[in-house]
Image (tube, helix red, strand yellow):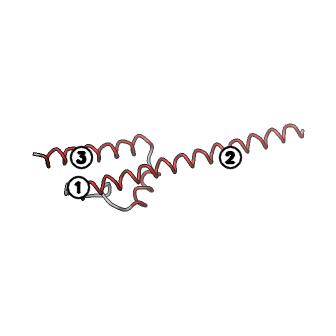
């Protein structure tokens, strides 16, 4: 009986570590996303591209909350879309 309790305690501890690691990973991922969004917004302003909306702001908290509310495919796609828009703006500016 004591062995079963010990095994259950070890399993619960392992699950807790896995959950903590998952949360830390999600936090680091959303930190990256928010930092990238802020950098992209700075480029938007510096190049005078004029992009507006929720995706184009200096509100880091808003970017973090949005990232935490969606899956990885969505936040990756959003960062890619902003980058594509910035690339188009840069190409138009060079003409």
Q: x and y percent of residue 43 in the render?
A: 27, 54
Q: What residue did someone put label 1 on? A: 51
In depth, the one of 71 and 29 nearer the eye is 29
Secondary structure of the residue carrying numbered label 2 = helix
Q: What residue did someone put label 2 on? A: 16
Residue 6: quarter of image:
top right
Question: Residue at horizontal 34%, vertical 46%?
Answer: 79
Q: What residue did someone put label 3 on? A: 85
Q: Report crowding for label 3: few under 14, some 14 to 19, many 20 or more residues within 10 A (C-alpha).
A: some
How far apart are the alpha carbons under marks 3 and 1? 8 Å
Q: x and y percent of residue 4 in the render?
A: 84, 38
Q: Report crowding for label 1: few under 14, some 14 to 19, many 20 or more residues within 10 A (C-alpha).
A: some
Q: The N terminus is located in which quarter? A: top right
Say left or right for 22 vs 30: right
How far apart are the alpha carbons under marks 2 and 1? 43 Å
Question: Residue at horizontal 32%, vertical 60%?
Answer: 57
The label on residue 10 is none
Q: x and y percent of residue 54 in the render?
A: 32, 57
How far apart are the alpha carbons under marks 3 and 2? 41 Å
- Contact between marks 3 and 1 (CB within 8 A): the answer is yes
Secondary structure of the residue carrying numbered label 1 = loop
In the rendered structure, which disc, 3 or 2, sits on the residue that comes first in sequence?
2
- Contact between marks 3 and 2 (CB within 8 A): the answer is no
Residue 45: quarter of image:
bottom left
Q: x and y percent of residue 3 in the render?
A: 87, 37
Residue 22: quarter of image:
top right
Secondary structure of the residue carrying numbered label 3 = helix
Q: Report crowding for label 2: few under 14, some 14 to 19, many 20 or more residues within 10 A (C-alpha).
A: few
In the rendered structure, which disc, 2 or 1, sits on the residue that comes first in sequence?
2
């Amino acid at each position: 009986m004591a062995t079963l309790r010990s095994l259950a305690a070890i399993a619960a501890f392992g699950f807790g570590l896995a959950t903590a690691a998952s949360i830390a990973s999600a936090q680091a991922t959303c930190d990256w996303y928010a930092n990238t969004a802020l950098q992209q917004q700075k480029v938007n302003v510096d190049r005078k591209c004029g992009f507006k909306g929720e995706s184009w702001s200096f509100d880091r908290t808003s970017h973090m909350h949005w990232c935490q509310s969606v899956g990885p495919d969505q936040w990756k796609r959003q960062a890619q879309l902003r980058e594509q828009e910035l690339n188009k703006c840069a190409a138009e500016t060079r003409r």
